[in-house]
Amino acid sequence: MKLYPLFLLMATATVLSPGPGVVMTLTNSLRYGVRGTFGGILGIAFGALVVAAISATSVGVVLATSAVAFTVLKFIGAAYLIYLGIRAWRAPAFKFAEQTTHEASFGKRFLEGISLQLTNPKAIFFFLSVFPQFIDPSMHYAAQFSALVLTYSALVVVIHCAYAFSARRAKNWLTSDKGGRAVSKVAGATFVFFGATLATAHR
């Protein structure tokens, strides 16, 4: 596999970049604590595996070449992001003292993470366009592809966990009335922004 160190750096920069997944992790960390983020983080990571697998099949090729398929998936993703944004915007200020453990259902957060990743058509085109550049055609394709995908998913887990712990360290401000309201509004506006951006995106 060629240029693996370069892929590692590029994938790290991509995962670090603020996006809907990062907002979800920070929001879950503030609402449910670090443990409450694991379901969503693993869901996002697993979603990356699924998206990568899809991109390696004819489904990925169809989405990359069909304007109709791209448009349908794009608007599904945009609608989901906007829904998350409205829900976050309307949510009350975070109150740590009032939180209970059962609110952070692992399964629910896991499904939310997967949904967030699967409704992002840009992820499919990322895997379609980026991965081939780092695969040596003279070597086994499946082994190289698997290594790159697992690396990307592992980076999602590590980096998002770091985001979750960082949010907890700033909880005194973030969980005050002022900070709590700010987080709800910023998270909501960010999700809506990404949803609107996705809805108006062109290939």
Image: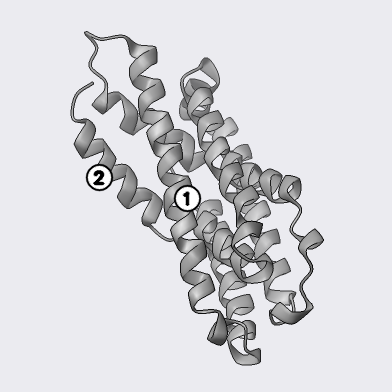
Question: Horizontal and vertical percent for residue 92?
Answer: 74, 80
Q: Which residue is mark 2?
A: 9
Decide which of 100, 152 is in the foreground and name it.
100
Left or right of 61, for residue 46: right
Q: Residue furthest bottom?
A: 178
Which residue does the image show at 68% across and 66% down from the upper left? 32
Q: Quadrant of the N terminus?
A: top left
Of badges 2 and 1, the one in the foreground is 2
Name the element at disc 2: helix
Q: Is residue 179 left or right of residue 126?
A: right
In the picture provided, is 54 more to the left or to the right than 134?
Answer: right
What kind of residue is marked 1? Ala
Mark 2, other Cα within 10 Å: few <14 / some 14–19 / many ≥20: few
Q: Is residue 70 above or below residue 115?
A: above
Where residue 24 appears, as percent x and y from the top left, is 59, 60
Residue occupying the point 49% across, 79% down: 170
Q: Are circles 2 and 1 on residues that touch, CB within 8 Å?
A: no
Q: Report the front residue among 36 and 78.
A: 36
Work out how far the residue at label 2 is from the one at label 1, CA to CA, in angstroms.
Answer: 26 Å
Colour convention of the picture: one colour
Nearer-N-terminus badge (2/1): 2
In the picture of the structure, the residue carrying the numbered disc 1 is: 201
The front one of 20 and 146 is 146
Identify the mark at residue 159; answer none if there is no mark: none
On screen, residue 82 above or below 145: below
Task: Check the image and report above or below for 12 versus 118.
Answer: below
Q: Position of residue 41 (x, y in %)?
A: 56, 49
Asked whether residue 95 is in view, the answer is: no
Residue visible at 40% across and 38% down in the picture: 152
Q: Find numbered disc 1 in the image and state the secondary structure of the residue it sits on.
A: loop
The image shows residue 118 at horizontal and vertical percentages of: 60, 39
What residue is shown at x 57% (from left), y 37% (from top)?
Answer: 47
